[in-house]
Each structure stands twice: as C-alpha cells, then as structure tokens.
C-alpha cells in the first residue's frame, strides 16, 4: 500500500476548519501535522493578522510553526505588485488590518494611509476598523489611476451573532461608488497564493488540505494541484450533495473524515468509481466517482449517492 502522504513532497494546509475551529484544535490535526515527514505550510485568506500571529495561534494549540511557513493573502498581493514591476519604496495605500501593513513593508514598499502620498496601488483586505474615510481614500486613489488589489472577495464573515460584512462587501462598497472593479483578487480560490506557497517550500508536487470546496478545492484545481477535502470544518452533508453536480474545478481528489487519512492508503480515500473500503464514506466516494463519470448524472446514480450521503450524515 502507498500511504497518501508518500505521493506528495509537501502539504499546503488551510487553517480554519482544518487545524483549528475558533480557539480549539480540530481533532487529530495537531498529532498528524506534528509528525508528518514532508514540509508543510499554512495558506490563509485572513488578511487581518500577520503570519506571526497566525503561527502563534497554532503554536498555542501545541504545534510549532515558523511564521515563514504561513502564507497570507496580503503576501499574494505584494507578490502581484512586484510582478507588475512596482519599484522599491513605492507608496501603497492600505485598507485593512496590520497584516497588510506588514506584508507591504516586508516586500520593500511603503505603506501609506492617505492619498496625498500619491499611492501607486491600493491593497484592500479585511480590517475590523475600516470605515468611511479609508474606503473613500481608496476610491479617490483608484479613480486617480492607482492599481486596485484586493486580498479576497468573501461577501460575509460568520460570527457568533450571524453573518458580518466580509472583505467582499467592503470592496463592493468602493466598486459601487467609483463604478470600477478591482484589478486583481489574490486570495483563494485564485491560484496565485498556491503557487507562492509551493515556491516557498521548493515543492513540485504539493497536496492541498482544506475544508471548503469554493476556496481550497477550487484553488487547488486552478493551480493544478491535488486536494484532500476533510470533513472537520465547513464541508458536511450539504457540500457532499453539491459535489454530485459540481463543476470539475470543485471536485477534490480525495475525501476523508480528518487528517489521519494522510497516514492511510491513498486508494482508500480517492474519489473513484471503484474506490475500495466499506462503510458510509467509501460508499459516498464510490457514488461521487460514478456521478462524475457522466456529463448528465442519471437519476438512479443520483439517488444512490444521496442515500449514501444520508447514511454518512446519520452515522
Ligand atoms: Mg477553512
């Protein structure tokens, strides 16, 4: 048997729903990641916190992590600005939290908060203090010709009270005012961050670990990487149902209950028409494999998959 992890030279790991949920560790994540034999890094759309804060949060759960192995969406933004040839020291208008300031300074640009500094670009990410003044400053700068780079366009942010405004909602406010769309979005599911993470580890064959189809799995597929969907976060029965008819870009290579799958046989967790194993989840994987082999899923196959997912959800 080939262990799943032996087929890859590195791991690109989503944080929320894969390593932690709120302040608590996801079951088995700390033991498994603490003992893997390949390099791994955390990839997160979180633009509010610098890599050191994210690394500290994971260390507090018992998993040592060098901040250099945390790749964030603001780092994707500055990589894009470098690619576009912005000179060293160029003023960049920041909208968002300290994670963006830090990424912009580390890349050798000058973070500014005022359009009077004649910013050549605006980098916009989520910050809990962002208000009318900053959004208006961004609007003026973009209208005057600054490049507009946004870290992610998630419309909402789930909190204990319900859905709060995500970065996408604040980007939409600026867009509504100036009648212009952002030049680029750097976070997941765009492939840019995945390539940045692989380059940083010197990886040629990374496996992406995630809990969301629309960001982790879509991003992995867009970047040409394999992915393992774990069912410890957002993805549950509804997402598995969605997979019956999902766009090929949202189909994970593997599905497992949790990260312990990395130590198991790759064949056992691959979504395939004849994936082995008994129990509800192997049944779901086989069913999805059968569904994906048709461009128009036949009714009986659809019913079988739904039944398998129901059985898994009631386990
Ligand atoms: Mg997640």
Image (cartoon, rainbow, N blue to C red):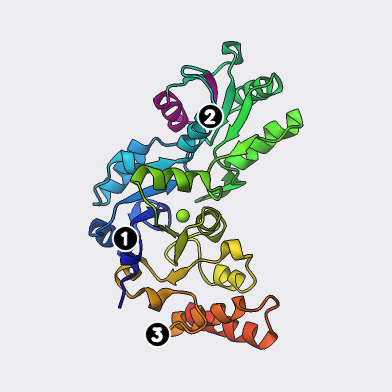
Q: Is residue 258 left or right of residue 65?
A: right
As drawn, the label of residue 277 is 3
Q: Position of residue 2 (x, y in %)?
A: 31, 74
Q: Name the residue under label 1.
A: 29
Q: Is the residue marked by circle 1 packed among few (<14), some (14-19), or many (20+) residues within 10 Å?
A: some
Q: How far apart are marks 1 and 3 (CA)?
A: 23 Å
Res. 128 in view:
no
Q: Which of marks 3 and 2 is nearer the N terminus?
A: 2
275, above or below 68, in the image: below
| Secondary structure beneath label 2 | helix
Residue at the spot 46% in from the left edge and 62% down from the top edge: 226
Q: Give the range drawn in magenta.
A: 91-107
| Secondary structure beneath label 1 | helix
Q: Mark 2 points at which residue?
A: 81
Residue that protrudes farthest toward the top in the picture = 116
Residue that protrudes farthest toward the front in the picture = 204
131, above or below 258, in the image: above
Residue at the spot 28% in from the left edge and 56% down from the top edge: 38
Q: Nearer the viewer, residue 196 or 133?
A: 196
């Amino acid at each position: 048997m080939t262990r799943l992890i032996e087929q890859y030279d590195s791991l690109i790991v989503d944080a929320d729903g894969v390593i932690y949920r709120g302040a608590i560790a996801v079951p088995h994540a700390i033991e498994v990641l603490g003992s893997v034999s390949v390099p791994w890094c955390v990839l997160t759309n979180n633009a509010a916190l610098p890599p050191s804060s994210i690394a500290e949060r994971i260390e507090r759960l018992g998993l040592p992590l060098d901040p250099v192995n945390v790749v964030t969406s603001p780092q994707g933004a500055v990589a894009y600005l470098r690619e576009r040839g912005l000179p060293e020291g160029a003023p960049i208008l920041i909208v968002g939290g300290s994670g963006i300031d830090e990424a912009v300074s580390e890349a050798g640009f000058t973070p500014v908060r005022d359009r009077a500094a004649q910013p050549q670009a605006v980098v916009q990410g989520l910050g809990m203090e962002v208000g009318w003044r900053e959004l208006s400053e961004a609007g003026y700068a973009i209208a005057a010709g600054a490049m507009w780079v946004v870290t992610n366009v998630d419309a909402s942010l789930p909190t204990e009270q319900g859905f709060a405004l995500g970065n996408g909602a604040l980007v939409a406010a600026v867009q509504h005012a100036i009648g212009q769309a952002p030049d680029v979005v750097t976070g997941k599911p765009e492939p840019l961050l995945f390539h940045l993470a692989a380059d940083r580890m010197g990886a040629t064959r990374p496996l992406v670990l995630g809990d969301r189809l629309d960001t982790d799995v879509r991003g992995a597929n867009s970047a040409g990487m394999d992915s393992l969907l774990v069912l410890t976060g957002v993805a549950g029965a509804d997402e598995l149902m969605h997979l019956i008819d999902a766009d090929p870009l949202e189909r994970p290579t593997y599905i497992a209950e949790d990260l312990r799958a990395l130590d198991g046989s790759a064949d056992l967790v691959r979504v395939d028409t004849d994936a082995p194993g008994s129990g509800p989840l192997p049944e779901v994987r086989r069913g999805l494999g059968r569904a994906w082999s048709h461009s128009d899923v036949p009714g009986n196959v659809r019913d079988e998959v739904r039944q398998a997912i129901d059985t898994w959800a009631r386990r």
